[in-house]
Amino acid sequence: MNRRVLRFIIVAAGAALAIAFAFRQWQEAKRMAAASEQRRILRIDMQRQLSAAEESLHEARLQAADLDRELKTAGAQAGPAAGADPQSESARAGATAALHARYMKAYRDNLGVQWGLLFRLLGLSQDQTEKLKDLLVQREENDITVQQAANRRGLDESSPEIQALDDELDRENKAAIAALLGPQGYAQFRDYYHDRAILPIVSDLAGELYSTDNPLSAPQAQQLIGILAGSSDKKNGSTVVKGTLNWDEAIAGAQASLSQPQVEALAALRSQYDTDQQLTAFTKNLIESAAAPGP
């Protein structure tokens, strides 16, 4: 590609991103005029923390899997003598434990963001909320245990042996959650878990409407979750697949549950999502073009 053309494309992309950023900043400045907007800023910050925690989860799991494979390989290659150094083994165990502890703390700290809407919908007391958080942390611990067991044994997670372990841990956790929430509460918990891919949309809409004359109520949020889930593709017949929402169908279905200003805000949110996707795709294509060899 001609350098002058490439330079022009890069400058144009930068200008487009700058305009989009400036527009977003202008919108944010208008919203911040109201005192109640401080709560929205807090929500955005908490969402960023959640994203950081999810990245930490991915990194932690990869590191744990790599460590398990390395230890297994080292043991197979070096034989019994490989485990003869207790100091080295203790150091590896300590590093793994520290990494795990950091991740689990970050995971629990962000449960209020990820599950906060459900806590409100269920009307949980503070004590019930903390107990449910404990069980959600245990659920994550179970997932990590299953992954590590599969790595140590050199098995796929879908193998009968690993699946049996997963089912046992999952059964105990579900029983404890059901005992805490009761039948109706557990049904809401299960639906919320399956619909978690579209929950950020409901959260964003609630934030947009919070300081207006038409805030999103808890019953409306619950109804909207069902509408968005029903307008999305499902994995295994129940779990919403991220990025498959049929917006036209969802907005049409929301007419019966939301007021006209709320529906208009949902349509505006769709436009914002579309713009974000277009900018992301444009930037990705530009980077790929710049990296491609010339003719």
Image (cartoon, grey):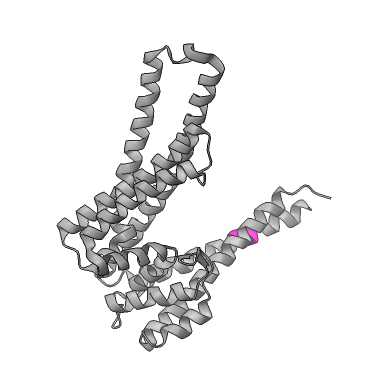
The image shows a total of numbered marks equal to 0
Query: In the picture shown, does residue 171 fall above or below 61?
Result: below
Q: Residue furthest right?
A: 295
Q: Position of residue 63 (x, y in %)?
A: 47, 35
Q: Position of residue 84 (x, y in %)?
A: 42, 12
- Quarter of image, res 14: bottom right
In this image, 177 relative to 191: left or right? left
Residue at left 63%, top 62%?
282
Residue at left 53%, top 65%?
243
Tell me the magenta residue range.
10-14
Q: How would you classify the magenta stretch by its main secondary structure?
A: helix
Residue at left 46%, top 46%?
163
Q: Is residue 122 visible?
A: yes
Query: In the picture shown, does residue 22 fall above or below 156?
Result: below
Q: Position of residue 119 (x, y in %)?
A: 25, 64
In this image, 20 relative to 131: left or right? right
Of the pair 51 and 65, the residue shown nearer to us: 65
Query: In the picture shown, does residue 34 fall above or below 95?
Result: below
- Quarter of image, res 128: bottom left
Assess whether residue 227 is covered by the magenta stretch: no
Of the pair 149 and 115, the residue shown nearer to us: 149
Residue at left 51%, top 75%?
271
Q: Position of residue 274 (x, y in %)?
A: 54, 71
Q: Is residue 110 visible?
A: no
Of the pair 27 and 206, the residue shown nearer to us: 206
In this image, 24 relative to 142: left or right? right
